[in-house]
Amino acid sequence: MKLLAGVDLENAQMLSTERVAYWYFRLNGFFQMENFIVHPERRRGGQRTDADLIGVRFPFRADRYVDTPEHPIQDDQDTLSLEEGWTEIVIVEVKRIERCTLNGPWTNPENQNVQRVLAAIGCFETDRLDEVATEIYSTGLFEDEERKQRLRLIAVGREKNGKLLGDFPAVLQITWEEILKFIGCRLYKYRSPKSDNKQWDDQIKLMQEIVQYCVKGQEFDDLKFVHICSEQLGIRKA
């Protein structure tokens, strides 16, 4: 039996890839809709597809300390390629043990699934949906320089995918190692202001407990955190 700060990991709730991805984007300031379903046009028939996460991050996002508002908490600027002053809209595909991959509905223009998602969330005018969707189907990225507004596809998986990079170089690929390392370091570095977490779910609370287990003295072992969380996600053998 593996005990972790009083928690029996073998009997604890496993980490969910969808929830861990959700918390990564939430900690980076994205407002999100989970498991967004694209329904068929007619009453009969199954759903067309679903998006694991749809998120938006506004241009003046800042998670600030009350005592030191001049020093906002730092987001994962480099991994997410965030640009100051831009509105970021993301459609995220989450894979557990597979490489970063996009499902067919996001790369096949015939079914117009991207148009349907854009119409549902309302981030672009109706008469621009085809224009925006064409770029997404072609490259996975649409940017409006004048409005500083960007829509892109993001693929989350166990490892990066060379074929996806070749076919869609503008699609951002993020690995679980990158996600877990950011979450662990964020929870450790800002453990004091984030200690009041009664409304957080069991997934992020478990990761906070794993962070505590990975602290020795004043040092946080991020590699140990990634390893333990990977086991709890089922993407690495114990």
Image: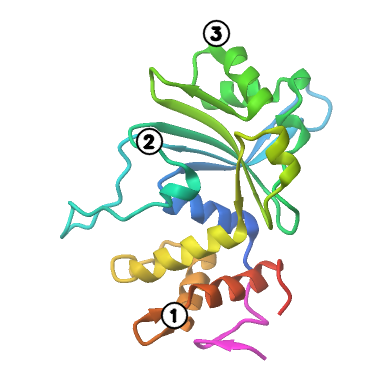
Q: Nearer the viewer, residue 16 or 180?
A: 180
Please determine whether, in this image, residue 131 is positioned above or below residue 48.
above
Question: Which quarter of the picture shows residue 217?
Answer: bottom left
Residue at figure coordinates x 34%, y 82% from the top left: 218
Identify the residue position indicated by label 2 in the image.
58
Q: In the rendered structure, which amino acid carries the disc numbered 3?
A: Asp
Considering every residue shown, the one lying at the far left of the view is: 67
Q: Please tell me whether residue 10 belongs to the stretch shown in magenta.
A: yes
Q: CA distance from mark 3 to mark 2?
A: 23 Å
Q: Is residue 234 left or right of residue 227?
A: right
Q: Which residues are magenta?
A: 1-14
Circle 1 SS class: helix
Q: Nearer the viewer, residue 81 or 147?
A: 81
Can you see residue 130? yes
Q: On the rendered image, what quadrant is the C terminus found in?
A: bottom right
Check residue 212 in the rendering and tell me which mark sits there, or answer none. 1
